[in-house]
Image (cartoon, rainbow, N blue to C red):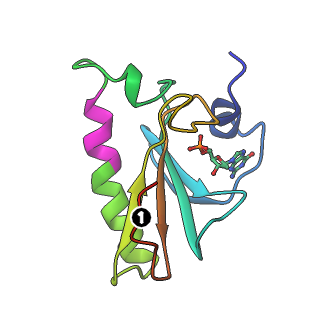
Amino acid sequence: MDCLFCKIIAGEIPSTKVYEDDEILAFRDIAPQAPAHILVIPKEHIGGVDELTEENSFVVAHIFAKIAEIARKEGLADGYRVVSNVGEHGCQSVRHLHFHILGGKQLNGSMV
Ligand code: DGP
């Protein structure tokens, strides 16, 4: 499958890893939009939030538990934003489920 994030998981494309276990990988975004900008992805290929089901969504609970841990380690005690873009209207550019952690500065209050 020609998926950029699957290639990052396989080590075919280098990344700056922040956290990894059997189920998930967290790495720094190549084009950071905040002082801290980390992507957290499942190792299983799931296209996006729109491909989550009762069968595969257990990994999302794990991802969010680790997001809290990662944010603490990154020193984001003052807060941060977790975002998952979905599909064309959501401006999703990589069709592999991912959650952006954005922080390290006062973020804009507007969501769109
Ligand atoms: P989205 O637009 O929500 O699908 O986010 C995709 C993000 O992936 C975007 O913020 C930039 C990031 N990205 C794209 N290519 C690479 C890459 O090769 N390495 C890393 N670390 N991040 C990438």
Quadrant location of residue 110?
bottom left
As helix, strand or loop, the secondary structure at mark 1 comes to loop
Of the 4 image quadrants, the one containing the N terminus is top right
Residue at the image point whose x is 39% and y is 24% from the top: 50
Residue at the image point whose x is 57% and y is 29% from the top: 88
- The answer to whether residue 101 is left or right of residue 69 is right
Residue holding disc 1: 110
Q: Is residue 62 magenta?
A: yes
Residue 87 % position (x, y): 52, 28
Residue at the image point whose x is 44% and y is 44% from the top: 84
Quadrant location of residue 55?
top left
Q: Residue furthest left?
A: 54
| Rendered view: 17 above or below 55 | below
Between 27 and 99, the residue placed more toward the observer is: 99
Q: Which residues are magenta?
A: 57-63
Residue 62 % position (x, y): 29, 45
| Rendered view: 26 above or below 77 | above
Q: Is residue 102 magenta?
A: no
Residue 27 % position (x, y): 59, 55
